[in-house]
Image (spheres, rainbow, N blue to C red):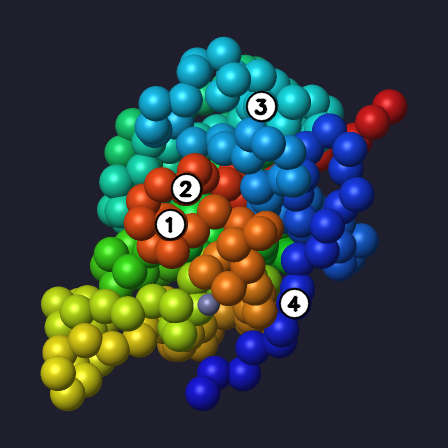
Amino acid sequence: MVRAEIARETPTGDTLIPRMELPHWRERYGIVAGVTTRGTGADPWDLGLIGDLPVGRVIGQWTAFRGAEPGFPLATLGRQVHGTEVMWHEGGRGWLIVDGVDGHATAAPGVLLCVTVADCTPVYLLDQGTGAMALLHAGWRGASSRILERGIRLLRGRAGTQVENVVMHCGVSICGDCYEVGPEVFAAFGLPVPAGGKGPLDVRASLLRQAAELGIGSISTSPLCTGHHRDWFHSHRRSGGADGRMIAYLGRPLATP
Ligand SMILES: [Zn+2]
């Protein structure tokens, strides 16, 4: 077992949009690291760019989401493909949507890195030495294809990150008990296939093992599960594909004058 601190996301009390975040990341590092939730209204909060929701509603929710964090002139999002590409961002203004990208990274304040999730793990990485950071979307495909290593390599190449300075958090995602998978998934991770072929898989545990192998300095994981907490979160698996998407986000806001 990898030693990882348990760090629970807590509701922010934001009246504009429903969300949870890691309060100690804001206090210790000046970083916002969180995830939106379903909300309690008749229309759940759904910030995904897939599905058949009216465009006006999606844009309206995104506008409200961005308004809730005014220190970020740029927000980045990928049309995710369960791949391992992580994109570096220098800065800018507006809402950047990139095809085929499952992770984002930056060293610049004012860039809000975003990924969509609904069972997959958002992986938050912060280099305490340089202030560079990355946010990754890791389902079983991305995790077993080692998107975490890809993200660390990008931080090293672009920001000179030393891995022992990296703080990592595995955010809200589906737990092993809620996630039964077939033999091809165990094979992808190099794990033994259970008798009968199917069994529970804890993707966060695999990510934590990879983090320890990579030498990441400080590792924490959320105890919250999208499947167990359907009242808070969207769960693709538990809803049979009917649920929407949440946004996980990470960034250092511009200093307010
Ligand atoms: Zn669960």
**In the image, which is nearer the foreground, mark 4 or mark 3?**
3
In-front residue for pair 212/116: 116
Query: How far across and how far down the image is residue 214, in percent?
Result: 40, 71
**In the image, which is nearer the foreground, mark 3 or mark 1?**
1
- Picture residue at 39% right of the left edge, 68% below the top: 178
Answer yes or no: do the residues labelled 4 and 1 have beta carbons within 8 Å? no
Quarter-of-image position of residue 85: top left
Local secondary structure at mark 1? loop
User: Which amino acid lies under the numbered mark 3 shown in the image of this protein?
Assistant: Gln
In-front residue for pair 119/113: 119
User: Which amino acid lies under the numbered mark 1 shown in the image of this protein?
Assistant: Ser
| Cα gap from disc 2 to disc 4, whole angstroms | 25 Å
Q: Badge 4, how many Cα within 10 Å: few under 14, some, many 20+?
A: some
Name the residue beneath numbered marker 1.
239
- Relative vertical location of residue 86 with respect to residue 178 in this rendering, above or below: above
Name the residue beneath numbered marker 3.
61
**In the image, which is nearer the foreground, mark 4 or mark 1?**
1
Left or right of 24, for residue 239: left
Query: How far across and how far down the image is residue 102, in percent?
Result: 35, 42
Name the residue beneath numbered marker 2.
243
Left or right of 224, for residue 145: left
Name the residue beneath numbered marker 4.
7
